[in-house]
Amino acid sequence: MAQMRLALAQVNATVGDLPGNTRAVRDWTARARTEGAHLVAFPEMMVTGYPVEDLALRRSFVDASRAAVEQLARDLAADGLGDLPVVVGYLDRVPEGYSDSDPGRDLPQNCAAVLHQGQVRARYAKHHLPNYGVFDEARIFAPGRDLTVVRVGDIDVAIAICEDLWQEGGPVSLTRDAGAELLLVINGSPYEQDKDDTRLELASRRAAQAGCTLAYLNLVGGQDDLVFDGDSVVVSATGQVLARGRQFEEQLLVVDLDLEESTVDPLAGLPAGVQHVVLSETPVEPYEPAPVSLPPRLDPVGEVYHALTLGLRDYVRKNGFRSVLLGVSGGIDSTLVATIAADAIGGENVVGVSNPSKYSSQHSRDDAAELAANLGLDYRVIPIEPMVSAFLDNVKLSGVAEENLQARVRALVWMGLSNQEGHLVLANSNKSELSVGYSTIYGDSVGGFAPIKDVPKTLVWELARWRNAEALRRGEKPPIPENTITKAPSAELRPGQVDQDSLPPYDLLDAILDRYVEGAEGRAQLIADGYPTEVVDKVVSLVDRAEWKRRQFAPGTKITALAFGRDRRLPITSRWREQDS
């Protein structure tokens, strides 16, 4: 048997911050050396951050990435770390002789570099380029062709990148023929509900197909509307979980592996499509393996809460904001957003603005004040009635127009304070409201980021209850007033208003939306499955008519399999209606 101490650096990269990202590689590699690692790996596109989208099409950006990787190899050697092999994701371009290359056009590639002794010793380009959901890589990158295997001591390590694991065939199918004892897969796999179980099943299945241990390393952190959850895992060829990373946290996951010694002689010939590079051939001296702890898994609702918190924290931090501002009405949506924001960046950095109107109930005002006190917000009360009255004295509005005016006056207050004081404004709308257009455009939809944009209303309540229960578990006071959770939701823009005046009950609404929006099921199928015809017709009509609103909405953290935005792209101008089908 041969031993290897593998270090998986589950870290947070920032798109475009090449100096910061490469500095992180040096820092985490030094930690890996301290831990006695024989090989250290970093996630997909670590050097550039991920996803880079159309930055990959800029020659200057590709050149900067290539230069950064070469300099990184030299810097690691200068740090005294040159003898520790490092696998790191970066952006490159097709090599000379790539037959599909247009001589007049650069073709970028999503690559992994193997750094050793001050040089880039090996290179691997991602084979399978995802072109679904949030991914658009087939449009941007050129695919790789060969499997790269590097020898570290007496162990052969095959390298793959993310989608290469998800698709049948390709580099995984070559791993067994190449005789590798370890398949190392570096990933930038975004979080969505229940995906961790899917990844584990996939990793176990691919390890069995490759006939070797598989190490799955994932990025962690927020990038625009995506959040990466870490949750790296190492499994044996028999599917045994050998090590697992924490969720939503940076971590150096160190695992001792007992593997078969390499029996491959590269000089005797290799299977077609395999590139083999020998980094070292000195076997590791036998040592006592360190115990590995498997961290407890978050429950499903806790996973979502952590995803939303990390997504917001990184959006604020990576875009240079120090504080956020939002309207706090005493309703469940603004309450949850304020709580997430306080957990993400500290309550002292959250400005909560109460804008009571003549229709605002006293219990809502009290709930907002109690929440602000519990979270330690910078809480401000700015009544809008004088401003609304002044407007109505000059422009006569009534009905829905008057209701929307109140929402837009509130938005003017928020944006004014944002401009004056430099806060990022948060929009409080949830996915159910966004689906049916139940948010005032340029009113409560105003904001630079929408933390619960992809959270259905029924899940909003679950998250609020989870956060209070978590506080009790920690021996703390629950932050969310119980009345906010139990009262009927209302926009409070007219006397006695509740959401169910104009919408179906949220449990019914969310069930239909899940199937119509995420499942792409049609009206006829929904009705055939027992949903009331009049409710289905109302819901699908509202969804179809609200596309123009959604197109203008702020980005927000994706947590479902299909979020509005890059996941779902429909025309605004369309005469197709489900009722016609």
Image (cartoon, helix red, strand yellow):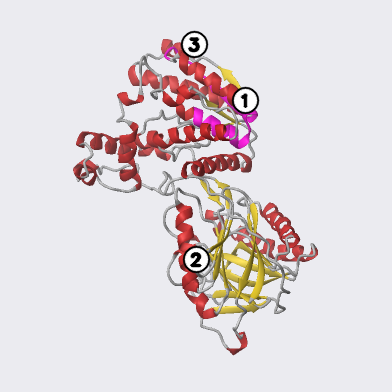
For the residues carrying marks 1 and 3, which lies nearer the camera in this image? 1
Q: Which mark is residue 239?
A: 2
- Amino acid type, residue under disc 3 in the picture: Pro
- Camera-side residue: 48 or 499? 499
Range of the magenta residues? 335-359
Q: Secondary structure at mark 3?
A: helix
For the residues carrying marks 2 and 1, which lies nearer the camera in this image? 2
For the residues carrying marks 3 and 2, which lies nearer the camera in this image? 2
Q: CA distance from mark 2 to mark 1?
A: 47 Å
Q: CA distance from mark 3 to mark 2?
A: 66 Å
- Amino acid type, residue under disc 2 in the picture: Gly
Q: Is residue 31 visible?
A: yes
Q: Secondary structure at mark 2?
A: loop
| Residue beneath the point at 48% across and 54% down | 196
Q: CA distance from mark 1 to mark 3?
A: 28 Å
Are the residues tagged 3 and 2 within 8 Å (C-beta)? no
User: Badge 3 is on which residue?
Assistant: 386
Q: Position of residue 279 (x, y in %)?
A: 69, 76
Q: Residues within 10 Å of mark 2 (few under 14, many from 20)?
A: many
Q: Which mark is residue 376?
A: 1
Q: Secondary structure at mark 1?
A: loop
Residue 90 on the magenta segment: no
Q: Which mark is residue 385?
A: none
